[in-house]
Amino acid sequence: MIDRRWEAAVAGGEATLRPVRWRGLPQRRTLLRVTLVAVLLGLAAAVLQTPPSCQPGAPPAASTAPAGTPPGGPRALPAGAVGVPIRLAEPAALAVLRPGARVDLLVVPAGGSTDPTLLAPRALVLDVVGASGAVDGSSALYLALPPEQARRAVGLPEGSRFAVVVRG
């Protein structure tokens, strides 16, 4: 039937390519479908723009940072403490540490016993540098220590090995 109309239109000289127009407004179902498709496309775009650090279903982490401190950035030095860079014997441990965490700092002095000694309990992690696995020795852990503990940590002989125990 369409072919006959087309042949009649072509024979009569009416071969135009005008767009098909709707008669009146679209029906309610059509508007609902178009709206649903637009919402789903917007949701898909939002999901694709979500940063990989944002896990679905995970509760938001409570920030213990003081006002004005970036949540993932280095912490401010507490009053009465000094900042000390520490190179860990096992740099892979840096991957689980975040600024604001509390750790126990252990040391095995060079040439001494193999038993670790607690050097600084509940030390505050200020920053973690090179946690992505730097092999050039540039990875370090910056801790806030009381001055006496900092002097003991810095005064250890070269070759001493440091380790941390993460506290809850």
Image (cartoon, helix red, strand yellow):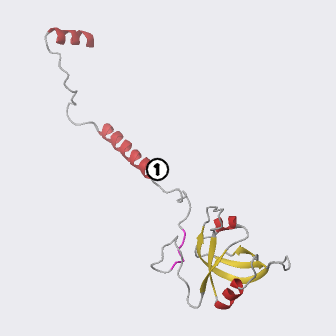
Of all residues, the one furthest to the left in this rendering is 13
Q: Mainly helix, strand or loop, the magenta region?
A: loop
Residue 91 occupies which quadrant of the picture? bottom right
Residue 124's spot in the image, x, y percent? 62, 80
Decide which of 62, 137 is in the foreground and name it.
137
Residue at x 73% of width, y 70% of height: 89
Looking at the image, residue 47 sits to the left or right of residue 132; the answer is: left
Residue 150 on image: x %, y %: 66, 86
Q: Residue at x 68, y 77 (%)?
A: 103
Q: Residue at x 43, y 52 (%)?
A: 46
61 is higher (above) or lower (below) than 51: below
Q: Is residue 83 magenta?
A: no
Residue 40 visible? The answer is yes
- Residue 65 versus residue 28 in the image, above or below: below
Foreground of the two, 65 or 91: 91
Residue 156's quadrant in the figure? bottom right
What number of labels is visible? 1
Q: Kindly tell me whether residue 1 is visible in this rendering.
A: no
| Amino acid bearing label 1 | Leu
Q: Tell me residue 81's x, y (percent).
A: 60, 88
Is 62 covered by the magenta stretch? yes
Is 114 placed left or right of 91 in the picture? Answer: right
Q: Position of residue 140 (x, y in %)?
A: 63, 72
Tell me the magenta residue range. 61-65
Give the residue at mark 1: 48
The residue located at (33%, 40%) in the rendering is 34
Q: Quadrant of the C terminus?
A: bottom right
On the image, which quarter does residue 30 sit in? top left
